[in-house]
Amino acid sequence: MNTLTVDLNRLAGPVFSGRNRGAAARQEYNLDQAEEQADVIQVVIPDSTYTVTSSFFLGLFGDSVRKCGSLSKFEKKFRYSAPDFLIPVLRGHASLALQNKKLFAQK
């Protein structure tokens, strides 16, 4: 199984916010290409994290969620190692990406 790790320890925290910062992280991790090659993407979020905002999440993973087409398919490919309190928050952000695909599409 080919696994890629997206380790947010490499980015400045403990608050991950801003769509532009999320999009920059997407480019840094080369996710467009990497998600085609990896079977699983392990997302590591530091224990010291206070929050991951929806804007950051959507900049980083919005396209990936939409490509997967459902929350269950996204969570099968993208697996979180994160503080427990963040898991439902991240699930909510992923669901948001699916609610209205055109609303969050890049222009």
Image (cartoon, rainbow, N blue to C red):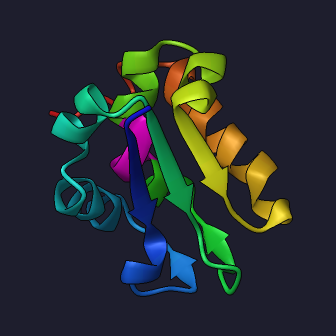
Q: Quadrant of the N terminus?
A: top left
Identify the main secondary structure in magenta: helix
Inspect the magenta stretch and tell me whether residue 26 lies in it.
Answer: no
Left or right: 16 as drawn, with respect to 28: right
Say above or below: 22 vs 3: below
Q: Is residue 40 visible?
A: yes
Inspect the magenta stretch and tell me whether residue 59 lies in it.
Answer: yes
Residue at 37% of width from left, 81% of height from top? 10
Q: Please give the count of numbered marks on the rendered protein.
A: 0
Q: Quadrant of the C terminus?
A: top left
Left or right: 27 as drawn, with respect to 16: left
Residue at 59% of width from left, 68% of height from top? 45
Q: Position of residue 56 (x, y in %)?
A: 44, 59
Going by the picture, which residue comes out furthest to the front?
A: 1
| Residue nearest the observer in this picture, 50 or 81 | 81
Q: Is residue 11 visible?
A: no
Task: Determine the image quadrant of residue 31.
Answer: top left
Left or right: 80 as drawn, with respect to 85: left
Say above or below: 84 vs 10: above
Residue at 41% of width from left, 87% of height from top? 12
Q: Position of residue 3 (x, y in %)?
A: 41, 43
Instruction: Please report the bounds of the magenta region as a residue range.
Output: 58-62
Q: Position of residue 35 (x, y in %)?
A: 30, 34
Q: Position of residue 40 (x, y in %)?
A: 47, 36
